[in-house]
Amino acid sequence: MGNRRKSRELAMQALFSIDMSPNGSKDVLERFCDNFTPSSKTLSFFLKLVHGVLHTRTEIDAVIARYSNNWKLNRMSCVDRNIMRVAVYELLCCQDIPHKVSINEAIDIGKKFGTEESGAFINGILDSIRRALENKDVDVKINFSPNTVE
């Protein structure tokens, strides 16, 4: 497994933990890292993804909600929701990663950690977002630079 794939998997798991915690605090991320320590090869990208999603979650969730017909975000499985958050962060903020790579990674992670339907569900929503981005139909203002993360 590649380092970026491992970073994405760990990011989804950390975001899942934060999502499931009653207060969603930074302490949850610290405890996660204490128990599932990212390797030196995965740490940087892992932190970029987690902090990026946490700082832009409102914008990311709005994009997912807009393109998930008949699905409210809080009714999606926590695994699927956080896989898509990572992928949408990549689509919006990681210009060095081709959109298809982000989507394919999300689908594969969904198949590994989600249900039988997760891959198709994630693909449908992310592909709609990708098309909208390529057609410039998504106007999202992200005021976050991964270089400013503490």
Image: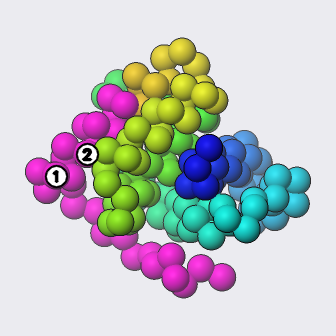
> Which residue bears the numbered disc 1?
134
Crowd around label 2: few <14 · some 14–19 · many ≥20 (10 Å): many
Which image quarter: residue 46? bottom right
Q: Residue at x 35, y 24 (%)?
A: 70
- Looking at the picture, does residue 118 appear above or below residue 89? above
Magenta-drawn stretch contains 128? yes
108, 145: nearer the viewer: 108
Quarter occupied by the C terminus: bottom right
| The label number, if any, that marks residue 101 in the structure image | none
Please name the amino acid that badge 2 sits on: Arg
Helix, strand or loop at mark 1? helix
Which image quarter: residue 47? bottom right
Q: CA distance from mark 1 to mark 2?
A: 6 Å
- Looking at the picture, does residue 52 appear above or below residue 77? below
Measured as percent of width and height from the top left, residue 126 is found at 34, 39
Residue with the most extreme top position: 116
Measured as percent of width and height from the top left, residue 121 is found at 41, 25
Do callouts 1 and 2 mark residues in contact (Cβ within 8 Å)? yes
Please name the amino acid that badge 1 sits on: Glu
Measured as percent of width and height from the top left, residue 92 is found at 34, 60
Helix, strand or loop at mark 2? helix
Quarter occupied by the N terminus: top right
74, 17: nearer the viewer: 17
> Which residue bears the numbered disc 2?
130
